[in-house]
Image (cartoon, rainbow, N blue to C red):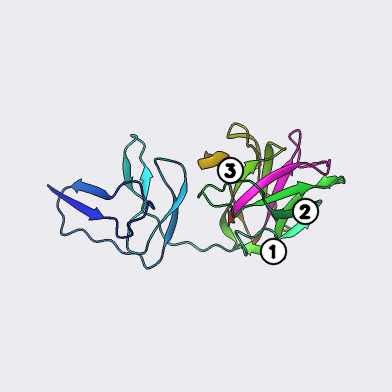
Amino acid sequence: EYSHTLPDPTGTPLVQFATWKFAGKYAGFPTYSRTSRKTYVDPLTGQVTGAPAGFPAFERMADGGIGLLLEGSSTNYLLSSQNFASGNWGKAGCTVAAATGITAPDGSTNCYTLTDDVTNGYHRIYQLGGPIPAGSQTAYAIVKAGTLTQCSITMYNPTDGQIALTYFDLSNGTILSTVAGSAKIKPLANGWYWCEVSGTGTVGANVYVEAVSGGSNAYTGTGTGTIHIWHAQG
């Protein structure tokens, strides 16, 4: 048996404790490496935080304990994934501006508010051109209720049609319905939710994040209906 204590080299509250202790069967001196900062959800607080290069991240285990978070490398194909006012995000039936008085899940104020207009139709932001490559496809957005308490996320391509579409309830953190593909939702700090959809497409998928009213993502807006968005990835 062995135990190994790894100090937090930053001296900052990026993780909850100054030291973490690992225990298990000895199989050689333990090593860990990562060349970049990793963003992850703190398993104790639900706050989005970060681990510096060379320092591990952690997750809540099924038995309620805390364990190492081990994940393969991944690529975010969505541009401007934390700047939804950017021209990389198309807008339909809405305006997008920096949020006022809203705290993001990492404690910052770097988040955006989508406000519907008064048209009858979709009120959404999107990226076209099939940014998510063909095959097994996943997209998520980190969203918070505003004056509207529902949202939806869609992945679509013109060959397969809707490969994923799920409606999420941002007031209680549940899935309202899944029309295509599969989905999950998990709570984060400060009233935010990680809303994720998955599906399989034969070509690249477009991604849409949509305001929802009365269970529909096509409705007549009021000009004051809002949801807040912090991050998206696909």
Secondary structure found at label 2: strand
What amino acid does circle 1 point to?
A: Ser
- Front residue of 109 and 184: 109
Who's the residue at 67% across and 63% down the image? Answer: 130
Q: Is residue 212 magenta?
A: yes
> Which residue is label 1 attached to?
86
How far is the residue under mark 3 from the one under mark 1? 28 Å
Q: Which segment did they paint magenta? A: 206-231
Where in the figure is residue 1, as x and y percent of width and height?
Answer: 12, 47
Who's the residue at 36% across and 55% down the image? Answer: 12
Residue 181: quadrant of the picture = top right
Residue 212: quadrant of the picture = top right
> Which residue is label 2 attached to?
95
What amino acid does circle 2 point to?
A: Thr
> Can you say whether 220 is above or below 73 in the image?
above
Which mark is first along the chain, 1 or 2? Answer: 1
